[in-house]
Amino acid sequence: MRPIQMVDLKEQYRHIKDEVDAAIHGVLDSAVFIGGKPVQDFCDHLAAYTGSRHVIPCANGTDALQIAMMALGLQPGDEVITPSFTYIATTEVIALLKLKPVFVEVDPRTFCIDPVSVEKAITPRTKAIVPVHLYGQSAAMEQILDIARRHGLYVIEDNAQAIGATYTFSSGEKVKTGTMGTIGTTSFFPSKNLGCYGDGGAIFTQDDQLAERMRMIANHGQSVRYYHDIVGCNSRLDALQAAILDVKLKRLDDYNAARRQVAAAYGDAFAGHAQITTPVIEPGNTHVFHQYTIILEGVDRDGLQQYLADRSIPSMIYYPVPAHRQKMFTDQGAGGEDLPVTDWLTKRVISLPVHTEMDQGHIEHITRNVIDFIQKN
Ligand SMILES: *Cc1c(COP(=O)(O)O)cnc(C)c1O
């Protein structure tokens, strides 16, 4: 059996090596490393795939969030509502731009921002909501968009973990995550569902003016070379990464389907074990299982992790400290909200390996050992 990893990029590459190598060599031969056709082609293909009017490439998913917030013209002290239960990047850029992160709860069933908690946190200074499609499933976007509309707020979807996932509105309209808010952002970090071989990111919007502004911000605030109209930054997706991503984008639906199959097999194996709560998929959602995360009740989580590690099974805690308890915020007088659901989840979640190269043997080895530990302890 191949060793079990949280993600197996080596094995994935082996299957697409010829095409990826040719794409890389094409860029090397052209000697155009920044911008150029591969970046344009990939953005066009990603726009078509997601149904987004604009796709703006950038250097990583954190920059994507930063550029999005810069483009909206938010002012220091403006409040931005974000889940505490997320990767730090979502919340860090808010503070970086001198905005005030206001941390709210997630729905413990979906791990995504809780609309009730959002509504309660709104003040006259609130300017934006940042739902995160955590672990690969859409947040409750109909409710979030409704709240935003009623209060005149921007919505920035952090889609770093859910590219390719879909959401269905009550009207029956089905859309890709990242395309519903004012702006959507994503990351092409290697382990993401659509990952490159370095860093990369993208921004989505349907708004022509915002798109233009974000393109400028990502390029030193210029639209005409050497004429800088607004303060921007330098954030680019390079041609090598774009060429690699274009090869993988064609396989994204298959990759996501493979992840769903792993999740379904886990779900079958864990069914009926009262101490394990398996992921809930909301009706109308297509989950892309960036992570397969279960909730443990009455289980020694550290003990389980060690037991699995001793049997060559990796596992991870995403994330061991929620944002509202991170020193970077509490030292600044932010955070410290009372978020019992977030704290409760933080102590109980564990993520098991899920990737595109897992086979039945891997899954059986993992589920058998998880269940053995729970039954013995
Ligand atoms: C990975 C990730 C990011 C940041 O992406 P980078 O490319 O690493 O900067 C932001 N938000 C979430 C939820 C992520 O998982």
Image: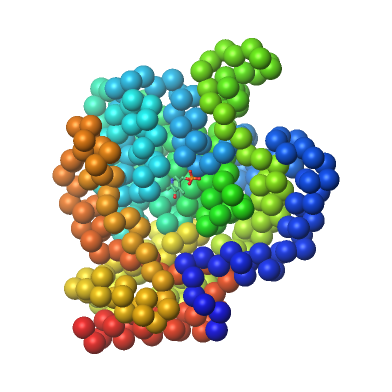
The quarter of the picture where the N terminus appears is bottom right
Quarter location, residue 268:
bottom left
Vertical order, 74 against 18 (above or below): above
Across and down, in percent, residue 12 comes to: 63, 66
Outermost residue on the right side: it is 29
Quarter location, residue 18:
bottom right
Q: Is residue 70 left or right of residue 102?
A: right
The quarter of the picture where the C terminus appears is bottom left
Quarter location, residue 122:
top left
Q: Judge by depth and name the residue closer to the eye, 87 or 280.
A: 87
Q: What count of labels does the image hold?
A: 0
Q: Is residue 41 visible?
A: no
Across and down, in percent, residue 271 comes to: 35, 79
Vertical order, 336 against 332 (above or below): below
The residue drawn where x is 39% and y is 82% is 311
Vertical order, 138 against 265 (above or below): above
Q: Is residue 352 visible?
A: yes
The residue drawn where x is 57% and y is 38% is 59
Q: Is residue 130 left or right of residue 236?
A: left
Across and down, in percent, residue 256 comes to: 56, 62
The residue drawn where x is 53% and y is 46% is 187
Across and down, in percent, residue 109 comes to: 31, 59
Q: How is the image coloured?
A: rainbow
The residue drawn where x is 70% and y is 46% is 240
Q: Is residue 37 left or right of residue 273?
A: right
